[in-house]
Image (cartoon, rainbow, N blue to C red):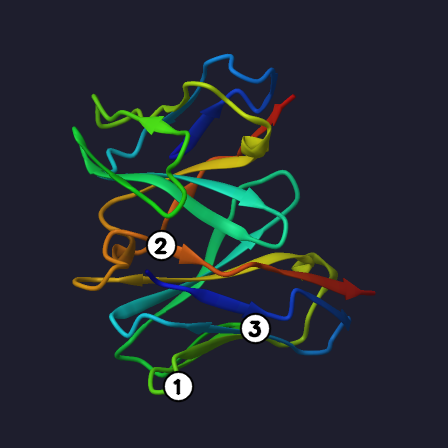
Amino acid sequence: GENVEQHPSTLSVQEGDSAVIKCTYSDSASNYFPWYKQELGKGPQLIIDIRSNVGEKKDQRIAVTLNKTAKHFSLHITETQPEDSAVYFCAAAANAGGTSYGKLTFGQGTILTVHP
Amino acid sequence: EAQVTQNPRYLITVTGKKLTVTCSQNMNHEYMSWYRQDPGLGLRQIYYSMNVEVTDKGDVPEGYKVSRKEKRNFPLILESPSPNQTSLYFCASSVTRPTGGLFHFGNGTRLTVT
């Protein structure tokens, strides 16, 4: 089935700096790549997603890039703020075919800490 | 308010004592799923359901059962819990299959099996 690898496992930045989290996936049938933010004591919440027909997507300070050839995608957070501190997960899913159909496979998570 | 509700939030039990974690959504979603979250392993899918009476195994189904008799409910059953099932569990739902976007997650159930 699909395997999603996420790096780094922890990331510490100063307020105002940029943060980048990277993921790779194995199933070429995967065509949907969401990112989730999990705050303490809560379930993950979708912050941005990208589909395989798009190379980049932005939403204010957050952007995601996708390289289908290399099978990797990244989350970029600019002008980080202390409230960005959380656990971030990438994920992958396939629309049809492949062993990933019907499943949303997650990476291992990145603990992001933004220091004031 | 649109939400996924899991109960209980915390559960401590002993090996072998059957338990059920309930999950309910009020958004008329077709797709529901259970995940477990363990440090360093991320979220791993246990079971999922595309619609009523349709369930399928995820990546770590051993030791778990589910049922989907009604659209809104998707309980997770541990017939004979073991210590390796100590984990944080999340139920999630979406309008349609995962590529349709926007999973809604519950707030989690922390299970300890001694």
Which residue type does callout 2 highlight?
Leu
In the picture, the quarter occupied by the N terminus of chain A is bottom left
Q: Is residue B33 left or right of residue B51?
A: right
Disc 1: which residue: A70
| B25 lies above or below B96 | above
Q: Give the distance between the C-alpha atoms of the residues marked 2 and 3, in whole angstroms.
A: 25 Å
As helix, strand or loop, the secondary structure at mark 3 comes to loop
In the picture, the quarter occupied by the C terminus of chain A is bottom right
Which residue type does callout 3 highlight?
Arg
* Residue drawn where x is 38% and y is 80% of the image: A71
Q: Residues within 10 Å of mark 1 (few under 14, many from 20)?
A: few
Q: Give the distance between the C-alpha atoms of the residues marked 1 and 3, in whole angstroms.
A: 25 Å
Of labels 2 and 3, earlier in sequence is 3
| A64 lies above or below A93 | below
Residue A80, quarter of picture: bottom right
User: Looking at the image, which residue sits at the far top?
Assistant: B17
Residue A104, quarter of picture: bottom left
Provide the chain ID for the residue under circle 3.
A
Which residue type does callout 1 highlight?
Ala
The disc label shown at residue A104, or none:
2
Disc 3: which residue: A61
* Residue drawn where x is 17% and y is 62% of the image: A96
